[in-house]
Amino acid sequence: MLTDYVDEVKALNADGELRFYPGSSYLTYRLMREQDRMRLYELHNKKIDVLSHNFRDTGRRTMVYDGDGFEGTKGILPPPRALVLIDPS
């Protein structure tokens, strides 16, 4: 598992200089199937723009919301099937 993570870090830093590392939302996106969808919630105003930018080209597969993920998730439950990942601050 660690090897897979290191491979992802290397792919984001192709020039060999460590400047970027994949967060949990990126790693989750990379593991998604074509039919899967992801909703991302961010409480920190400064991070919402970065998150939106990072997922701007994913179309309808990823939706980014400014707000509390716990509250947002409660509003869409119960979906047919879901995985909920809460990444604490």
Image (tube, helix red, strand yellow):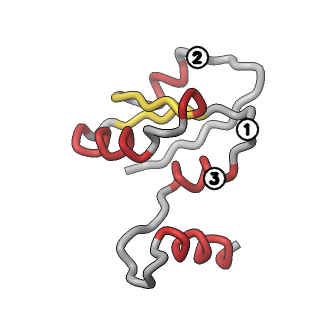
Three-letter amino acid code of the residue under disc 1: Glu
> Is the N terminus in the top left, top right, bottom left or bottom right quadrant?
bottom right
Q: Which residue is mark 3?
A: 30
Which circle's residue, 3 or 2, is located before the other in the chain? 3
Three-letter amino acid code of the residue under disc 2: Ile
Residue 2: quarter of image? bottom right
Q: Which residue is mark 1?
A: 34
Mark 1 surroundings within 10 Å by alpha-carbon count, few (fewer than 14), some (14 through 19), many (20 or more): few
Nearer to us: label 3 or label 2:
3
Q: Position of residue 80 (x, y in %)?
A: 77, 20
Q: Is residue 3 above or below residue 78?
A: below
Helix, strand or loop under label 3:
helix
Q: Position of residue 5 (x, y in %)?
A: 61, 71
Query: Toward the viewer: 31 or 82?
Result: 31
Which circle's residue, 1 or 2, is located before the other in the chain? 1
Left-right relation of 27 to 16: right
CA distance separating discs 3 and 2: 23 Å
Q: Residue at x 40, y 68 (%)?
A: 20
Query: Toward the viewer: 86 or 41?
Result: 41
Q: Which residue is mark 2?
A: 76
Q: Is residue 10 above or below residue 68?
A: below
Three-letter amino acid code of the residue under disc 3: Arg
